[in-house]
Image (tube, grey):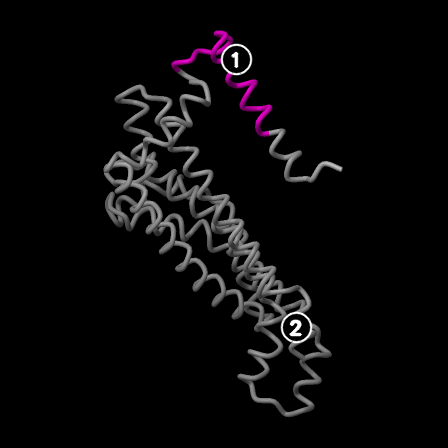
Amino acid sequence: MVPPFVRKLAGLVGFLLVWEAASRLGLVDARVLPPPSQVLLRFALLFTDQRFVADVISTVLSWLIALLCATVVGVGLGMLFGSVPALRLISMPVVEFLRPLPAVALIPLAIALFGTQAQTKIVLAAFAATWPILLNTSYALGEVDPRLVETARCFRVSRWRLLTGVTLPSIGPFVLTGVRISASITLIAVVGTEFLAGGSIGLGQYAFIQGTSGGRMDVVLAATVFAGLFGCLVNAGFLAAQRRWVSWGSGEVAA
C-alpha cells in the first residue's frame, strides 16, 4: 500500500511536470509564467540577495508581533465575553460586523493614522487575526463541561486552580486552533499590506518591485514559494504542538 505522503508528493510532482511542459512548449507565456525549474533555481539564489533577506526579516518580525497581539487581545476578550453571557450577547453583533471586514480595505485609514511604516501592517494584520481566536475562545468557554466545574467547586479548589486545572485545559485545543488559523491570516495580511501600501520594506514590497519594475516574474514566484513554505512550516509547527501538549481530552484528564 502506497503511503499517503507518497501519494501527496506524486500529485505535487505531477502538477510541476505539467506546469514545466506547458511553459517549455509555449502553451503559456514563459515571461509571465516561467517554468518551475527556473523558479526553484531563483528560489535557491534568493538568499544571496541582501535586500530579500532584510525584507524577509521585516515580514517575519511583523507577522510574529501581529500574531502575539492578536492572541493576547483575542484570548482576553474571548474569555471575557465567554464568562459574561450578557456582555457576549451585546458584543457579538459588533464582532460579527467587524469580523468580515477585509483588512486591506482599511489600508487608507491605517496609513492616515500610522503612516507607511511597520505599524500599519502590524495593526491591520492583528485586526484580521483577532477574530478566529476571539470566537474560538468565547465559544470554547461555553463548551466547558459543567460537571467538571461543579466537581472542582465541591472540593473547594481556588479560583486559580479552577482556571488552570479545568478551564484552560478544556479550552486549550480550541484556542490553539484559533491561533493556528490566525497565523495564516496574519501572514496574508502582512504581505498583502506590504504589497499594496508601499513605502515599507517586506516580502510583499520586494515582490511588487521585482514584478512591476524589473518584470522578473521568476523572482516574484520564488518569493511567493518562500511565503507558502513559511506558512506550511508554521502550520505544521502548531499542529505538532497541539498533538504534543494540548489534547482534546485534556480537560477530563486535568480534572
Main SS of the magenta segment? helix
Above or below: residue 118 compared with residue 133: above
Query: Going 62% across and 29% down the picture, which residue do you hit?
Result: 11
- Residue at left 68%, top 68%? 249
Image location (x, y in percent) of residue 240? 56, 56
Q: Give the range drawn in magenta.
A: 12-31
* Residue 72 figure quarter: bottom left
Position of 227 with respect to 148 (left or right) is left
SS of the residue under disc 1: helix
- Where is residue 48 drawn, in percent x and y? 27, 35
**Circle 1 residue:** 22
**Earlier-in-chain disc, 1 versus 2:** 1
Residue located beneath label 2 in the image = 251
Q: Quadrant of the C terminus?
A: bottom right
Can you name the residue that lies furthest to the right here? 1
Q: Where is residue 167 in the image (x, y as percent from the top left)?
A: 60, 74
Q: Do the residues labelled 1 and 2 touch (CB within 8 Å)?
A: no
Q: Residue at the location (54% across, 52% down)?
A: 96
Image quadrant where one finds the N terminus: top right
Q: What residue type is labelled 2?
A: Gly
Image mark for residue 105? none
Q: Residue at x 38, y 26 (%)?
A: 41
Local crowd size for mark 2, using a 10 Å CA cut-off: few (<14), some (14–19), many (≥20): many
Of badges 1 and 2, nearer the viewer stands: 1
Up the image or down, 247 lies above or below 123; here it is: below
Q: Distance between the residues labelled 1 and 2?
A: 53 Å
- Residue type of the residue flagged with mark 1: Ala
Magenta residue check for 202: no
In this picture, residue 224 sits left or right of residue 58: right
